[in-house]
Amino acid sequence: MKKAKTRIVGNVPKGMSKTEETWIRESVDALFGHFGKMSEIISYEGITFKVGSLSYTPDFIHQFEDGTLIIVEVKASKSQRDFAYSMARLKATAQKFPIFDFVLAVPAHITGWDITPIETE
């Protein structure tokens, strides 16, 4: 199988975490391995969702070849500080905006990524 190359539209922003930088390099293969479709990054922190008094700015928006958009939240670890609060905002946003697919991406212990779809029910 031909290895995909990640393409981001626009410049890679400064101040990105190391985990987010790694996601840029590995995301196409990670999402293809999980969903079986090719994607490209079309936005980094480019949109903010409002849910009541909460605001949520996702790390990345990917677009699959078929036009489907997927919102990706990248975390270094599920045990990092404020993880539970981040997940609560992510789930509330996914419930309010079901037109998008939301996923959590966390580096796997050995190699690759743990991709977890966010359920809206």
Image (cartoon, helix red, strand yellow):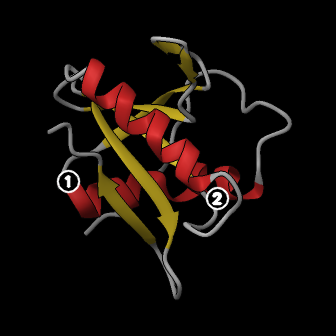
Q: Which residue is mark 2?
A: 22
Closer to us: 49 or 72: 49
The residue depicted at 49 percent of the width and 77 percent of the height is 108
Circles 2 and 1: CB atoms closer than 8 Å = no
Closer to us: 61 or 120: 120
**How many dots with numbers?**
2
Q: Which mark is residue 35?
A: 1
Q: Is residue 2 left or right of residue 40?
A: left
CA neighbours of label 1 inside 10 A, class few (<14), some (14 to 19), many (20+): few
Amino acid carrying label 2: it is: Thr
- Disc 2 and disc 1: Cα gap in Å? 19 Å
Q: Helix or strand or loop: what does disc 2 sit on?
A: helix
Q: Can you give x and y, in whole percent of width and height, for residue 65 in the image?
A: 23, 32
Q: Is residue 44 above or below residue 118?
A: above
Q: Which mark is residue 119?
A: none
Closer to us: 74 or 22: 74
Q: Earlier in the sequence, mark 2 or mark 1?
A: 2
The residue depicted at 57 percent of the width and 35 percent of the height is 59
The residue depicted at 36 percent of the width and 38 percent of the height is 91
- Picture quadrant where residue 10 is located: top right
CA neighbours of label 2 inside 10 A, class few (<14), some (14 to 19), many (20+): few
Going by the picture, which residue comes out furthest to the right?
15
Q: Helix or strand or loop: what does disc 1 sit on?
A: helix
Q: Is residue 82 above or below residue 97?
A: below
- Picture quadrant where residue 77 is located: bottom right
Amino acid carrying label 1: it is: Phe
The residue depicted at 35 percent of the width and 60 percent of the height is 115
Q: Is residue 33 left or right of residue 61?
A: left
Judge whether residue 4 can be spotted in this image: no
Judge whether residue 75 can be spotted in this image: yes
Going by the picture, which residue comes out furthest to the bottom?
110
